[in-house]
Amino acid sequence: MLAAAARKLNVPLHVLTPGAQDPATALASSVVLAELDDVAATRELARRSGAITFENEWVDLPALAPLSFDGVVFLPSLEALAPLVSKRGQRQMLQDQGLPCPRWCDLPTSGLLPEGFNYPLMAKASTGGYDGKGTAVLRSPEDLTALLARVPQGDWILEEFVNFEQELSQLACRDRAGNVRCYPLVQTHQHQQVCDWVLAPASVPHAVQAYARNIAASLLTAINYVGVISIELFYGPSGLQVNEIAPRTHNSGHFTIEAAHTSQFEQQVRIVAGLPMGSVEFQVPGALMVNLLGFESSEADYQAQRDDLAAIPEATVHWYGKEGSSPGRKLGHVTLLLHGVTAGERAGQAEQLLERVRSIWPLPPQNP
Ligand code: ADP
Protein backbone atom coordinates (compact mmCIF):
# COMPACT_ATOMS: atom_id res chain seq x y z
CA MET A 1 0.00 0.00 0.00
CA LEU A 2 2.98 2.28 0.67
CA ALA A 3 4.51 1.31 -2.69
CA ALA A 4 1.21 2.02 -4.45
CA ALA A 5 1.08 5.48 -2.86
CA ALA A 6 4.66 6.21 -3.97
CA ARG A 7 3.74 5.21 -7.53
CA LYS A 8 0.76 7.54 -7.48
CA LEU A 9 2.99 10.42 -6.34
CA ASN A 10 5.76 9.55 -8.81
CA VAL A 11 8.23 9.14 -5.95
CA PRO A 12 10.84 6.42 -6.64
CA LEU A 13 10.63 3.77 -3.91
CA HIS A 14 13.26 1.11 -3.31
CA VAL A 15 12.34 -1.89 -1.19
CA LEU A 16 14.42 -4.09 1.10
CA THR A 17 12.63 -7.40 1.62
CA PRO A 18 13.53 -11.06 2.10
CA GLY A 19 10.56 -12.16 -0.04
CA ALA A 20 10.83 -12.12 -3.83
CA GLN A 21 7.02 -12.56 -3.87
CA ASP A 22 6.47 -9.59 -1.51
CA PRO A 23 3.63 -7.57 -3.15
CA ALA A 24 5.71 -4.39 -2.81
CA THR A 25 8.33 -5.76 -5.22
CA ALA A 26 5.89 -5.51 -8.14
CA LEU A 27 5.45 -1.77 -7.56
CA ALA A 28 8.95 -0.79 -6.42
CA SER A 29 11.50 1.10 -8.51
CA SER A 30 14.10 -1.44 -7.39
CA VAL A 31 14.42 -4.25 -4.87
CA VAL A 32 17.21 -5.27 -2.49
CA LEU A 33 16.51 -8.91 -1.74
CA ALA A 34 17.88 -9.62 1.75
CA GLU A 35 16.88 -10.22 5.35
CA LEU A 36 15.65 -7.09 7.14
CA ASP A 37 18.51 -7.21 9.65
CA ASP A 38 21.16 -7.41 6.90
CA VAL A 39 23.15 -4.21 7.49
CA ALA A 40 25.15 -4.42 4.22
CA ALA A 41 21.85 -4.67 2.34
CA THR A 42 20.52 -1.63 4.24
CA ARG A 43 23.67 0.26 3.14
CA GLU A 44 22.86 -0.67 -0.44
CA LEU A 45 19.28 0.55 0.07
CA ALA A 46 20.69 3.82 1.46
CA ARG A 47 22.96 4.21 -1.57
CA ARG A 48 19.87 4.15 -3.81
CA SER A 49 17.66 6.35 -1.59
CA GLY A 50 17.45 9.83 -0.11
CA ALA A 51 15.81 8.55 3.08
CA ILE A 52 14.80 5.23 4.62
CA THR A 53 11.55 4.51 6.43
CA PHE A 54 10.05 1.40 8.02
CA GLU A 55 6.96 -0.76 7.70
CA ASN A 56 7.29 -2.40 11.10
CA GLU A 57 9.04 -1.65 14.37
CA TRP A 58 11.17 -4.78 14.52
CA VAL A 59 14.26 -2.73 13.81
CA ASP A 60 17.75 -3.61 15.00
CA LEU A 61 18.66 -0.12 16.22
CA PRO A 62 22.27 -0.82 17.38
CA ALA A 63 23.05 -2.48 14.03
CA LEU A 64 21.78 0.55 12.09
CA ALA A 65 23.44 3.17 14.33
CA PRO A 66 26.71 3.24 12.27
CA LEU A 67 24.71 3.99 9.12
CA SER A 68 22.99 6.89 10.86
CA PHE A 69 26.43 8.08 12.01
CA ASP A 70 27.59 8.00 8.37
CA GLY A 71 24.74 10.32 7.35
CA VAL A 72 22.02 7.88 6.23
CA VAL A 73 18.67 9.58 6.86
CA PHE A 74 16.16 7.39 8.71
CA LEU A 75 12.60 8.79 9.08
CA PRO A 76 11.58 8.42 11.83
CA SER A 77 15.13 8.73 13.20
CA LEU A 78 16.65 5.85 15.16
CA GLU A 79 16.59 8.11 18.25
CA ALA A 80 12.84 8.66 17.88
CA LEU A 81 12.27 4.93 17.37
CA ALA A 82 14.36 3.92 20.39
CA PRO A 83 11.61 4.34 23.03
CA LEU A 84 8.98 2.82 20.71
CA VAL A 85 10.46 -0.55 19.70
CA SER A 86 9.55 -2.25 22.99
CA LYS A 87 6.44 -2.13 25.17
CA ARG A 88 8.57 -1.40 28.23
CA GLY A 89 10.23 1.52 26.40
CA GLN A 90 6.82 2.86 25.38
CA ARG A 91 5.43 2.67 28.92
CA GLN A 92 8.57 4.32 30.35
CA MET A 93 8.44 7.13 27.77
CA LEU A 94 4.72 7.78 28.40
CA GLN A 95 5.36 7.90 32.13
CA ASP A 96 8.34 10.27 31.68
CA GLN A 97 6.22 12.58 29.50
CA GLY A 98 3.30 12.54 31.95
CA LEU A 99 1.01 10.97 29.34
CA PRO A 100 -1.78 8.68 30.56
CA CYS A 101 -1.28 4.89 30.35
CA PRO A 102 -2.25 1.86 32.46
CA ARG A 103 -0.18 1.33 35.62
CA TRP A 104 2.62 -1.13 34.88
CA CYS A 105 5.67 -2.83 36.40
CA ASP A 106 8.32 -5.35 35.41
CA LEU A 107 7.31 -8.98 35.75
CA PRO A 108 8.18 -9.77 39.40
CA THR A 109 10.55 -12.76 39.32
CA SER A 110 9.71 -13.50 42.96
CA GLY A 111 6.10 -14.22 42.06
CA LEU A 112 4.99 -11.48 44.51
CA LEU A 113 3.03 -8.55 43.11
CA PRO A 114 4.30 -5.04 43.89
CA GLU A 115 2.17 -2.86 46.20
CA GLY A 116 -1.06 -1.69 44.58
CA PHE A 117 -1.28 -4.39 41.88
CA ASN A 118 -4.13 -6.89 42.04
CA TYR A 119 -5.48 -9.67 39.85
CA PRO A 120 -6.63 -9.77 37.09
CA LEU A 121 -3.56 -8.38 35.34
CA MET A 122 -2.36 -8.21 31.76
CA ALA A 123 1.12 -9.61 31.07
CA LYS A 124 2.87 -8.59 27.86
CA ALA A 125 6.09 -9.53 26.09
CA SER A 126 8.09 -6.33 25.83
CA THR A 127 9.24 -7.17 22.28
CA GLY A 128 8.10 -9.36 19.40
CA GLY A 129 4.37 -9.52 20.26
CA TYR A 130 1.59 -8.58 17.87
CA ASP A 131 -2.12 -9.32 17.43
CA GLY A 132 -2.30 -10.68 20.98
CA LYS A 133 0.65 -13.03 20.44
CA GLY A 134 2.77 -12.16 23.45
CA THR A 135 -0.02 -11.21 25.86
CA ALA A 136 -1.59 -13.20 28.70
CA VAL A 137 -4.35 -12.44 31.18
CA LEU A 138 -3.31 -13.44 34.72
CA ARG A 139 -6.21 -14.21 37.04
CA SER A 140 -4.34 -15.73 39.98
CA PRO A 141 -0.90 -16.25 41.56
CA GLU A 142 -0.88 -19.68 39.84
CA ASP A 143 -1.16 -17.99 36.43
CA LEU A 144 1.81 -15.79 37.33
CA THR A 145 3.89 -18.81 38.43
CA ALA A 146 3.03 -20.62 35.20
CA LEU A 147 4.00 -17.57 33.12
CA LEU A 148 7.30 -17.15 34.98
CA ALA A 149 8.13 -20.77 34.17
CA ARG A 150 7.62 -20.34 30.44
CA VAL A 151 8.88 -16.88 29.47
CA PRO A 152 12.43 -15.45 29.40
CA GLN A 153 13.27 -13.41 32.50
CA GLY A 154 13.32 -9.66 32.06
CA ASP A 155 11.38 -9.68 28.80
CA TRP A 156 7.80 -9.29 30.07
CA ILE A 157 5.89 -6.50 31.80
CA LEU A 158 2.71 -6.56 33.87
CA GLU A 159 -0.02 -3.97 33.72
CA GLU A 160 -3.37 -3.36 35.35
CA PHE A 161 -6.37 -4.82 33.52
CA VAL A 162 -8.32 -1.91 32.07
CA ASN A 163 -12.12 -2.08 31.97
CA PHE A 164 -12.47 0.05 28.88
CA GLU A 165 -15.72 0.83 27.07
CA GLN A 166 -14.11 1.47 23.71
CA GLU A 167 -10.76 1.13 22.03
CA LEU A 168 -9.79 4.16 19.98
CA SER A 169 -6.97 4.91 17.58
CA GLN A 170 -5.41 8.28 16.88
CA LEU A 171 -3.54 8.39 13.57
CA ALA A 172 -1.21 11.37 13.43
CA CYS A 173 1.76 12.63 11.47
CA ARG A 174 4.62 15.08 11.83
CA ASP A 175 6.83 16.48 9.07
CA ARG A 176 10.53 17.36 9.09
CA ALA A 177 9.74 20.97 10.05
CA GLY A 178 7.81 19.83 13.13
CA ASN A 179 4.26 20.45 11.88
CA VAL A 180 1.76 17.98 13.40
CA ARG A 181 -1.55 16.87 11.86
CA CYS A 182 -4.07 14.48 13.40
CA TYR A 183 -6.61 12.41 11.49
CA PRO A 184 -10.08 12.20 13.07
CA LEU A 185 -10.15 9.77 16.02
CA VAL A 186 -11.54 6.30 15.17
CA GLN A 187 -12.99 3.36 17.12
CA THR A 188 -11.36 -0.05 16.78
CA HIS A 189 -12.89 -3.38 17.69
CA GLN A 190 -10.83 -6.52 18.37
CA HIS A 191 -11.80 -10.17 18.02
CA GLN A 192 -9.52 -12.41 20.07
CA GLN A 193 -7.07 -9.48 20.34
CA VAL A 194 -6.88 -9.01 16.56
CA CYS A 195 -8.38 -5.86 15.01
CA ASP A 196 -11.72 -6.90 13.52
CA TRP A 197 -13.30 -3.62 12.40
CA VAL A 198 -12.69 0.14 12.54
CA LEU A 199 -15.43 2.79 12.62
CA ALA A 200 -14.40 6.26 11.46
CA PRO A 201 -14.91 8.72 13.00
CA ALA A 202 -15.36 7.48 16.59
CA SER A 203 -18.52 8.63 18.34
CA VAL A 204 -17.00 10.26 21.44
CA PRO A 205 -17.33 13.76 22.93
CA HIS A 206 -15.29 16.61 21.43
CA ALA A 207 -13.25 16.88 24.64
CA VAL A 208 -12.07 13.29 24.18
CA GLN A 209 -11.11 13.96 20.57
CA ALA A 210 -9.21 17.07 21.64
CA TYR A 211 -7.41 15.18 24.41
CA ALA A 212 -6.35 12.43 21.98
CA ARG A 213 -4.95 15.04 19.58
CA ASN A 214 -3.17 16.69 22.46
CA ILE A 215 -1.57 13.39 23.52
CA ALA A 216 -0.45 12.75 19.92
CA ALA A 217 1.04 16.22 19.42
CA SER A 218 2.86 16.11 22.78
CA LEU A 219 4.26 12.66 22.12
CA LEU A 220 5.40 13.33 18.53
CA THR A 221 7.06 16.58 19.54
CA ALA A 222 8.68 15.19 22.70
CA ILE A 223 10.52 12.46 20.81
CA ASN A 224 11.05 14.50 17.60
CA TYR A 225 9.20 11.89 15.57
CA VAL A 226 8.91 12.35 11.79
CA GLY A 227 6.34 10.34 9.82
CA VAL A 228 2.96 8.68 10.37
CA ILE A 229 2.21 7.14 13.77
CA SER A 230 -0.75 5.29 15.27
CA ILE A 231 -1.62 5.69 18.94
CA GLU A 232 -4.04 3.09 20.30
CA LEU A 233 -6.07 4.18 23.32
CA PHE A 234 -8.47 2.79 25.91
CA TYR A 235 -11.49 4.93 26.73
CA GLY A 236 -13.76 4.28 29.71
CA PRO A 237 -14.26 5.03 33.40
CA SER A 238 -10.50 5.64 33.83
CA GLY A 239 -10.57 8.25 31.04
CA LEU A 240 -8.27 8.04 28.06
CA GLN A 241 -5.14 5.86 28.38
CA VAL A 242 -2.51 5.04 25.77
CA ASN A 243 -2.28 1.31 25.16
CA GLU A 244 0.13 0.91 22.29
CA ILE A 245 2.07 3.06 19.86
CA ALA A 246 2.81 1.82 16.34
CA PRO A 247 5.58 3.94 14.76
CA ARG A 248 4.36 3.42 11.20
CA THR A 249 1.29 3.27 9.00
CA HIS A 250 -1.24 1.05 10.74
CA ASN A 251 -4.20 -1.27 10.15
CA SER A 252 -6.50 1.15 11.99
CA GLY A 253 -5.70 3.77 9.32
CA HIS A 254 -6.33 1.65 6.20
CA PHE A 255 -9.74 3.28 5.70
CA THR A 256 -7.95 6.59 4.89
CA ILE A 257 -7.22 5.24 1.38
CA GLU A 258 -10.86 5.76 0.44
CA ALA A 259 -12.17 8.11 3.14
CA ALA A 260 -9.52 10.81 3.68
CA HIS A 261 -8.16 13.41 1.30
CA THR A 262 -4.69 12.01 1.93
CA SER A 263 -4.26 8.33 2.79
CA GLN A 264 -1.88 7.38 5.59
CA PHE A 265 0.39 5.78 2.96
CA GLU A 266 0.48 8.87 0.75
CA GLN A 267 1.14 10.96 3.87
CA GLN A 268 4.09 8.78 4.85
CA VAL A 269 5.59 8.98 1.34
CA ARG A 270 5.05 12.76 1.28
CA ILE A 271 6.79 13.27 4.62
CA VAL A 272 9.73 10.98 3.86
CA ALA A 273 10.17 12.52 0.38
CA GLY A 274 10.08 16.05 1.84
CA LEU A 275 6.81 17.00 0.09
CA PRO A 276 4.23 19.15 1.95
CA MET A 277 1.79 17.09 4.07
CA GLY A 278 -1.67 16.58 2.59
CA SER A 279 -5.04 17.27 4.24
CA VAL A 280 -6.06 14.76 6.93
CA GLU A 281 -9.75 15.63 6.61
CA PHE A 282 -12.33 13.09 5.45
CA GLN A 283 -13.93 13.46 2.02
CA VAL A 284 -17.00 11.46 3.18
CA PRO A 285 -18.91 11.59 6.49
CA GLY A 286 -17.46 8.26 7.63
CA ALA A 287 -16.21 4.77 6.86
CA LEU A 288 -16.24 1.23 8.18
CA MET A 289 -13.17 -0.94 7.61
CA VAL A 290 -13.53 -4.69 8.18
CA ASN A 291 -10.47 -6.93 8.25
CA LEU A 292 -10.78 -10.16 6.28
CA LEU A 293 -9.36 -12.53 8.89
CA GLY A 294 -8.71 -16.14 7.89
CA PHE A 295 -11.47 -18.39 9.28
CA GLU A 296 -9.92 -21.75 8.30
CA SER A 297 -6.66 -23.31 7.16
CA SER A 298 -6.82 -23.30 3.37
CA GLU A 299 -5.02 -22.52 0.13
CA ALA A 300 -8.21 -21.05 -1.39
CA ASP A 301 -8.11 -17.64 -3.09
CA TYR A 302 -11.70 -16.81 -1.97
CA GLN A 303 -12.48 -15.17 -5.33
CA ALA A 304 -16.24 -15.73 -4.94
CA GLN A 305 -16.31 -14.06 -1.51
CA ARG A 306 -14.14 -11.19 -2.75
CA ASP A 307 -16.55 -10.63 -5.66
CA ASP A 308 -19.56 -10.67 -3.31
CA LEU A 309 -17.90 -8.16 -1.00
CA ALA A 310 -16.95 -5.90 -3.92
CA ALA A 311 -20.60 -5.96 -5.05
CA ILE A 312 -21.71 -4.14 -1.87
CA PRO A 313 -22.30 -0.50 -2.90
CA GLU A 314 -19.30 1.75 -2.21
CA ALA A 315 -17.18 -1.12 -0.95
CA THR A 316 -13.50 -1.43 -1.84
CA VAL A 317 -11.82 -4.78 -1.30
CA HIS A 318 -8.07 -4.93 -0.67
CA TRP A 319 -6.69 -8.46 -1.02
CA TYR A 320 -3.09 -8.91 0.16
CA GLY A 321 -2.28 -11.98 -1.94
CA LYS A 322 -0.69 -13.85 0.97
CA GLU A 323 0.10 -17.52 0.45
CA GLY A 324 -2.33 -19.60 2.49
CA SER A 325 -5.01 -18.80 5.04
CA SER A 326 -5.09 -19.75 8.73
CA PRO A 327 -7.57 -18.74 11.44
CA GLY A 328 -7.03 -15.09 12.42
CA ARG A 329 -4.51 -14.29 9.68
CA LYS A 330 -5.10 -10.90 8.04
CA LEU A 331 -5.75 -11.75 4.38
CA GLY A 332 -7.16 -8.41 3.29
CA HIS A 333 -9.69 -5.77 4.26
CA VAL A 334 -12.81 -4.11 2.91
CA THR A 335 -13.64 -0.42 3.30
CA LEU A 336 -17.27 0.73 3.15
CA LEU A 337 -18.21 4.40 2.96
CA LEU A 338 -20.85 5.80 5.34
CA HIS A 339 -23.01 8.77 4.41
CA GLY A 340 -25.05 9.25 7.60
CA VAL A 341 -24.93 12.85 8.78
CA THR A 342 -25.18 12.06 12.49
CA ALA A 343 -23.08 9.60 14.51
CA GLY A 344 -26.27 7.63 15.22
CA GLU A 345 -27.09 7.27 11.52
CA ARG A 346 -23.55 6.16 10.70
CA ALA A 347 -23.56 3.64 13.56
CA GLY A 348 -26.81 2.17 12.18
CA GLN A 349 -25.39 1.94 8.65
CA ALA A 350 -22.17 0.41 9.96
CA GLU A 351 -24.11 -2.24 11.87
CA GLN A 352 -26.08 -3.26 8.77
CA LEU A 353 -22.97 -3.31 6.58
CA LEU A 354 -21.04 -5.36 9.14
CA GLU A 355 -23.86 -7.91 9.15
CA ARG A 356 -23.73 -8.08 5.36
CA VAL A 357 -19.95 -8.53 5.35
CA ARG A 358 -20.28 -11.26 7.99
CA SER A 359 -22.81 -13.14 5.84
CA ILE A 360 -20.10 -13.34 3.15
CA TRP A 361 -16.98 -13.52 5.30
CA PRO A 362 -17.42 -15.16 8.75
CA LEU A 363 -15.34 -14.40 11.84
CA PRO A 364 -12.62 -16.89 12.77
CA PRO A 365 -13.80 -19.53 15.25
CA GLN A 366 -13.45 -18.80 18.97
CA ASN A 367 -10.15 -20.00 20.45
CA PRO A 368 -10.56 -22.84 22.94
P1 ADP B 1 -0.56 -6.51 20.55
O1 ADP B 1 0.80 -5.90 20.42
O2 ADP B 1 -0.53 -7.99 20.57
O3 ADP B 1 -1.58 -5.91 19.62
P2 ADP B 1 -1.89 -5.01 22.68
O4 ADP B 1 -1.17 -4.43 23.81
O5 ADP B 1 -2.40 -4.05 21.64
O6 ADP B 1 -1.00 -6.16 22.05
O7 ADP B 1 -3.11 -5.87 23.22
C1 ADP B 1 -4.01 -6.50 22.35
C2 ADP B 1 -5.44 -6.31 22.87
O8 ADP B 1 -5.54 -6.83 24.20
C3 ADP B 1 -5.85 -4.85 23.00
O9 ADP B 1 -6.35 -4.34 21.80
C4 ADP B 1 -6.93 -4.95 24.08
O10 ADP B 1 -8.15 -5.39 23.52
C5 ADP B 1 -6.39 -6.02 25.00
N1 ADP B 1 -5.58 -5.41 26.09
C6 ADP B 1 -4.29 -5.02 26.02
N2 ADP B 1 -3.85 -4.49 27.17
C7 ADP B 1 -4.90 -4.53 28.04
C8 ADP B 1 -5.11 -4.12 29.40
N3 ADP B 1 -4.13 -3.59 30.13
N4 ADP B 1 -6.34 -4.31 29.93
C9 ADP B 1 -7.34 -4.88 29.21
N5 ADP B 1 -7.21 -5.29 27.93
C10 ADP B 1 -6.01 -5.11 27.33
Image (spheres, helix red, strand yellow):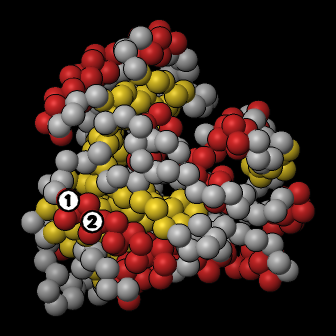
The reply, left or right, for residue 48 in relation to residue 116 is right
* Image mark count: 2
The amino acid type of the residue labelled 1 equals His
Residue in the picture at 36% in, 44% down: 195
Image quadrant for the C terminus?
A: top left
Residue in the picture at 30% in, 29% down: 338
The amino acid type of the residue labelled 2 equals Ala
Residue 126: quadrant of the picture: bottom left
Residue 206: which disc? 1
The reply, left or right, for residue 175 in relation to residue 332 is right
Residue in the picture at 70% in, 61% down: 274
- What's the CA distance linking mark 1 and mark 2? 6 Å
Task: Single out the residue that lies furthest toward the left.
Answer: 237
Measured from the top left, where is residue 21 in percent x and y? 74, 34
| Residue 128 visible from this viewpoint | no
Measured from the top left, where is residue 208 in percent x and y? 21, 63
| Residue 78 visible from this viewpoint | yes
Q: Which is more toward the observer, 98 or 143?
A: 98
Rate crowding at label 2 as few (under 14), some (14 to 19) or many (20 or more) other CA atoms within 10 Å: few
Residue 193: which disc? none
**Is 316 located above or below residue 162 in the figure?**
above
The kind of secondary structure element at disc 2 is: helix
Measured from the top left, where is residue 10 in percent x and y? 76, 42
Residue in the picture at 84% in, 50% down: 32
Residue 80: quadrant of the picture: bottom right
Badge 1 vs badge 2, beta-carbon distance below 8 Å: yes
Residue 210: which disc? 2
The reply, left or right, for residue 261 in relation to residue 163 is right
